[in-house]
Image (cartoon, helix red, strand yellow):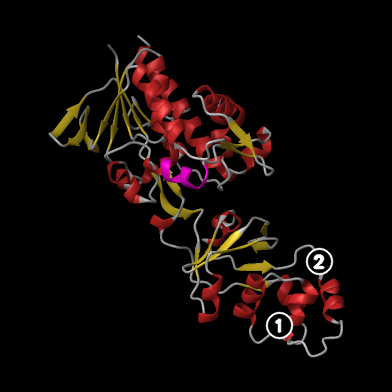
């Protein structure tokens, strides 16, 4: 029977395994950790955002320069297909007001259990604590609890993840086994910023900032973000990760629905015996956390604070470390792969998921592309293995 090996038991690897098993291949999945899909499960702890109910072209824009190489894969397995797939595994879904799609259970574990059961029914063998350590000629080297094995599958799909959250399995060590020219350097994506807060900000740690706009590099995000002990985090900030890591300055519009003239009009009302802070709060209805940010980054306030309220410069020390990023940019360049995601330098070996050189904001884009590329690579690998 034709043998296939998948390295990595995250969403991309499991999807590739399913496609090859359905095509009739004998599939083994090698996972370095003691259990599969650890990062997937962690993502589901705060509500598993599977995809986003969005038309094809707007959906593709989230992938920036990677939209073109990803286009055929996402056309074949996009948001609607992801929803059908999850419902086929017995997971009812709902779509939030922002278009984000979640399982009704709001976690990943029920979906993963159903998926693993289906894979087992297809004959897929999952081997945990099996770590890929490179090649020896045609052989794939795997370190296992019983010693090193050399496997010679007909096709291999690499789905090793990116380089963040190493404790969950995405440690980027696979890069050492591939030519430097075939991969772009790793960089943090969907990552927080480091801010050395003054003591008065402590009482706001964990507080979400809503109804603000973030500006960087000519881009604007209206998403929510959070003040944390380590700095700033959250989806509204993550959407700007690409431009922020290039050094673009960040500013906050704390009142995006009011122009400077309206701010001045409201602030011109008699202050009476109120403190300036109370006057700001009452006249502009600034939430306490917004007022705290204003005082943190603009103290002492000038007589006319309207320009700062509209464009508050954020002092920070750059992005959090790569391992703390939700996802990574960089990885295997599409130029090193053929149209089926096969490595040009190693025929019969394919790649999928976050180890490819693409990035996208949170909001369902990450998981959708991992599933789509896993499916694409699995189908291409099966065709190659079964072609006489």
Say the numbered circle drawn on residue 277.
Answer: 1
* Residue at image coords 66%, 71%: 290
* Residue at image coords 63%, 71%: 289
* Residue at image coords 55%, 25%: 87
Query: If the image is split into quadrants, where does the N terminus sit?
Result: top left
Say the numbered circle drawn on residue 162.
Answer: none
Q: Quadrant of residue 11?
A: top left
- Viewer-side residue, 108 vs 262: 108
User: Which residue position is annotated with label 2?
Assistant: 258
* Residue 46 is inside the magenta segment: yes
Q: Is residue 324 visible?
A: yes
Segment tinted magenta in the rendering: 41-47
Q: Secondary structure at mark 1?
A: helix
Image coordinates of residue 173 in percent, x first then y, are 30, 47
- Viewer-side residue, 307 vs 93: 93
Image coordinates of residue 320 in percent, x first then y, are 45, 63
């Amino acid at each position: 029977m034709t043998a296939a090996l998948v390295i990595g038991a995250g969403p991309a690897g499991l999807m590739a395994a399913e496609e090859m098993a359905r095509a009739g291949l004998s599939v083994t999945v090698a996972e370095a950790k003691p259990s599969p899909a650890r990062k997937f499960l962690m993502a589901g702890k705060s509500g598993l955002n599977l995809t986003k109910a969005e038309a094809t072209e707007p959906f593709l824009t989230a992938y920036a320069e990677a939209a073109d190489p990803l286009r055929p894969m996402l056309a074949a397995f996009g948001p609607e297909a992801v929803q059908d797939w999850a419902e086929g595994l017995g997971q009812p879904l709902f779509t939030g007001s922002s278009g984000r799609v979640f399982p009704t259970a709001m976690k990943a574990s029920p979906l993963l259990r159903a998926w693993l059961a289906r894979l087992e029914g297809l004959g897929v063998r999952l081997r945990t604590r099996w770590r890929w350590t490179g090649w020896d000629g045609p052989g794939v080297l795997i370190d296992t609890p019983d010693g090193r094995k050399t496997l010679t599958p007909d096709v291999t799909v690499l789905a090793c993840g990116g380089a963040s959250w190493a404790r969950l399995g995405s440690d980027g060590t696979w890069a050492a086994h591939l030519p430097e020219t075939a991969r772009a350097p790793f960089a943090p994506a969907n990552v927080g910023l480091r801010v050395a807060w003054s003591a008065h900000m402590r009482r706001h740690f964990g507080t979400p900032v809503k109804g603000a706009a973030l500006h960087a590099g000519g881009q604007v995000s209206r998403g929510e973000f959070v003040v944390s002990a380590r700095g700033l985090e959250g989806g509204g900030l993550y959407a700007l990760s690409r431009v922020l890591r290039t050094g673009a300055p960040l500013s906050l519009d704390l009142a995006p629905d009011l122009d400077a003239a309206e701010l001045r009009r409201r602030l011109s009302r008699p202050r009476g015996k109120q403190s300036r802070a109370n006057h700001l709060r009452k006249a502009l209805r600034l939430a306490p956390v917004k007022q705290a940010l204003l005082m943190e980054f603009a103290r002492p306030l000038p007589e006319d604070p309207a320009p700062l309220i509209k464009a508050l410069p954020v002092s920070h020390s750059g992005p959090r470390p790569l391992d703390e990023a939700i996802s990574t940019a960089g990885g295997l360049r599409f130029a090193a792969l053929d149209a089926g995601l096969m490595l040009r330098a190693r025929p019969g070996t394919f790649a999928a998921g976050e180890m490819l050189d693409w990035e996208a904001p949170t909001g369902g884009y990450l998981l959708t592309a991992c599933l789509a590329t896993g499916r694409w690579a699995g189908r291409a690998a099966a065709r190659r293995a079964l072609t006489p």
